[in-house]
Image (cartoon, rainbow, N blue to C red):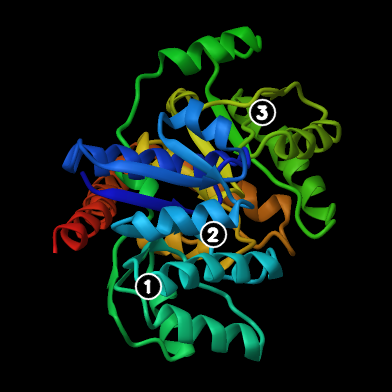
């Protein structure tokens, strides 16, 4: 039996990261059902309950070091772990876990990572000298390849794949329909899902989103539903936008599982997202999507499926968002078909991450 340790932003009630872990576990277990996997988590009990795997606290360094000493492979990923824009300290933590594995001579794979941006001489130097010593690197986009090149990381083997979540299996729409019914958001109207987050204390984009959402509701007779990807922060962000609106809307109030969120997205006619994994969920479920950029990872994902963001969070206007909605609405059937073809290729690349991990274990 092979033993894997997985390091990432897990156990923090972020739906995107939990979906990444679910997808990783799903594909790895399909390839090797006998794998024993332990996850380093901010909430080990939640991770055990949610994913059915062993888990250890991210602060229990002694236990982590013991696990790494007996592990056959450390997987670092997926997601944007190696960057210091949203958090300066987290970069050093994830590099530290990789360093501990190297100290006890456990092979390390960076798995579907989104690399960068990394700023600062010390941060860049440490990243280069630690990451250059891992066994294998897969990144989820070509922007991450460029960041590795900028850092001077040319070894080990590096391969561009796709975000791990894209390998997850689509689900039925029944569970999502039940949640919408419970929230009194069922009915015959088209449904437009919006995924929001707070960012940098800005409020102007909330005014733009509220104005656009009102116009979408009036023009298309649509029901506006806000999807929380990180609980409870995204609920509060959505409520602050809903309070600015004139038309009725629904803010989903709960913490939902990956399967429930996928099912909810499957009931929607369009998804507008600031959160990356709301957009990826729309891709998995074949729903037309519109992204709003606040981080290079949004632009990179949209580029991978031949799309561009509707605007930047810093300068967003209701007009540019409505223009993007009009285009998507008029051509949504063709867009579904176009995105389905592109995302099929992305799903193959996403599964490639797990295949390479199993190859590394077997070798």
- Disc number lying in front (3 or 2): 2
> For residue 107, which numbered disc appears in the image?
none
Q: What residue sits 55% from the left and 65% below the top?
A: 94
- Upstream in sequence: badge 1 or badge 2: 1
The residue singled out by tag 1 in the image is 142
Q: Is residue 238 visible?
A: yes
For the point 34% across and 66% down, the residue is 106
Label 1 close to label 3 by CB (< 8 Å): no
| 100 is higher (above) or lower (below) than 10 | below
Q: Which residue is more in the foreground, 116 or 102?
A: 102
Residue to which mark 3 is pinned: 217
Viewer-proximal residue, 237 or 33? 33
Q: Give the vertical position of 288 relative to 259 (above or below).
A: below
Circle 1 or circle 2, nearest the eye: 1
In front of the other: label 1 or label 3?
1
Residue 357 is situated, as x and y percent measured from the top left of the image, at 25, 57
Instruction: Find the distance from the CA under tag 1 to the CA under tag 2.
Output: 17 Å
Q: Which percent across, then down, holds residue 346?
A: 28, 53
According to the picture, the residue beneath numbered tag 2 turns out to be 309
**Residues at marks 3 and 2 touching, judged by CB atoms closer than 8 Å:** no
The answer to which of marks 1 and 3 sits earlier in the sequence is: 1
Label 1 SS: helix
Residue 305 visible to the viewer: no
Name the residue: 70% across, 42% down. Answer: 212
Disc 1 to disc 3, C-alpha distance: 37 Å
Q: Residue 236 sits in which quadrant?
A: top right
Callouts 1 and 2 close, C-beta under 8 Å: no
Image-based side of 360 in relation to 253, left or right = left
Residue 282, x across and y down, in percent: 44, 39
């Amino acid at each position: 039996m092979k033993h894997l340790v997985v390091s990432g932003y897990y156990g923090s009630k972020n739906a995107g990261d939990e979906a990444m872990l679910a997808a990783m576990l799903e594909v790895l277990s399909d390839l090797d059902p006998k794998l024993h996997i332990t996850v380093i988590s901010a909430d080990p009990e939640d991770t055990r309950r949610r994913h059915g795997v062993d888990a250890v606290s991210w602060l229990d360094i002694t236990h982590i070091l013991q696990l790494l000493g007996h592990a056959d492979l450390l997987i670092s990923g997926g997601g944007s772990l190696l960057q210091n824009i949203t958090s300066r300290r987290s970069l050093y933590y994830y590099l530290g876990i990789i360093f501990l594995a190297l100290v006890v001579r456990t092979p390390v794979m960076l798995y579907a990572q989104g690399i960068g941006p990394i700023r600062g001489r010390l941060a860049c130097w440490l990243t280069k000298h630690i990451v250059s010593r891992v066994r294998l690197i897969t990144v989820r986009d070509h922007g991450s390849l460029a960041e590795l090149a900028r850092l001077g990381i040319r070894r080990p083997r590096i391969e561009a794949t796709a975000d791990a979540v894209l390998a997850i299996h689509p689900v039925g729409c029944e569970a999502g329909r039940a949640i919408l019914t419970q929230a009194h958001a069922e009915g015959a109207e088209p449904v437009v899902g919006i995924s929001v987050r707070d960012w940098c204390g800005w409020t102007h984009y909330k005014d733009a989103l509220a104005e656009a959402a009102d116009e979408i509701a009036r023009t298309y007779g649509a029901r506006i539903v806000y999807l929380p990807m990180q609980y409870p922060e995204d609920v509060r962000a959505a409520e602050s936008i809903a309070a600015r609106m004139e038309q009725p809307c629904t803010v989903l109030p709960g913490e939902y599982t990956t399967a429930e969120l996928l099912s909810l997205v499957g009931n929607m006619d369009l998804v507008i997202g600031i959160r990356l994994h709301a957009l990826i969920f729309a891709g998995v479920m074949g729903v037309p999507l519109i992204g709003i950029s606040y981080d290079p990872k949004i632009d990179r994902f949209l580029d991978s499926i031949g799309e561009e963001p509707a605007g930047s969070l810093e300068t967003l206007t209701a007009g540019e968002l409505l223009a993007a909605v009009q285009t998507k609405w008029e051509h949504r059937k063709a867009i579904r078909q176009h995105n389905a073809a592109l995302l099929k290729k992305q799903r193959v690349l996403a599964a490639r991450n797990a295949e390479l991990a199993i190859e590394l274990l077997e070798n």
